[in-house]
Amino acid sequence: MTRLVECFFDVGSPAAYLAWMQLPKIVADAGGTLLWRPILLGGIFKATGNSSPVTIPAKAKWLMADLARFATRYGVPFQTPVGFPLNTLSLMRGAVGLQMQDQEAFTRYVSLVFSGIFSQGLVMSDPTVLAKVLGDAGFDLAAFDAMTSDPTVKQALVAGTDEAVARGVFGAPTMFVGETMHFGQDRLDFIAAELRR
């Protein structure tokens, strides 16, 4: 039985933020391995004909209230992000590039970005805001900017997004336990159950 959980995510997804906060413990408690798979959600939507649920006002209102209920259940801070939905292209290039270089830096970076967007109300897609947050956290800003402009990093994000589409992903977060796909942070109990088998 597989103990590997892959999670395809984009930092612009509030549901992916909640999964980021919960999945590590779920997988660790089961003795599994968690692999974060950065994707560009806009690319997923374009390739699959899907769109963000916030494009429907009534659904957007319900969704944010529902996500807030889950955040309360999990005991994590949550607020509707400013300027939502966000353009996450540069942010996700940063995630891919750091994951390619240094897993610890990747984890710190994604945590900072998720927290900035969904806990602190920061517009992390604004390069000035991102630079301030990363600089305060000790990241080398010149190296970060160079990395996000690297064609290899850009192609890696495209390749990861294309792979996700090929595997049936249509939104984020999408998790795989082996070949079994689970969509949405409200399906984490199914993942836990699979890992316990």
Image (tube, grey):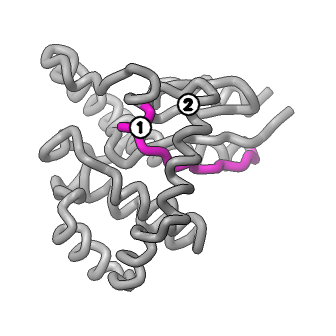
Quadrant hosting residue 49:
top left
Which residue corresponds to mark 1? 43
Answer left or right for 102 relative to 55. right
Q: Camera-side residue: 183 or 166?
A: 166
Residue at image point 38% right, 35% down:
15
Q: Is residue 65 above or below residue 92?
A: above
Secondary structure beneath dot 1 equals helix
Q: Position of residue 38 (x, y in %)?
A: 51, 49
Q: Is residue 75 magenta?
A: no
Q: Is residue 111 left or right of residue 66?
A: right
Q: Nearer the viewer, residue 90 or 140?
A: 90
Q: Is residue 80 above or below residue 107?
A: above
Asked if residue 36 is among those painted magenta in the image, a careful observer would answer yes
- Residue 177 shown left or right of residue 124 in the figure: right
How packed mark 2 is, by other alpha carbons closer than 10 Å (few <14, some 14-19, many 20 or more), is some
Residue at the image point whose x is 29% and y is 27% from the top: 52
Q: Which residues are magenta?
A: 31-44
Q: Label 1 amino acid?
A: Gly
Tell me, for residue 165, which label it has, or none: 2
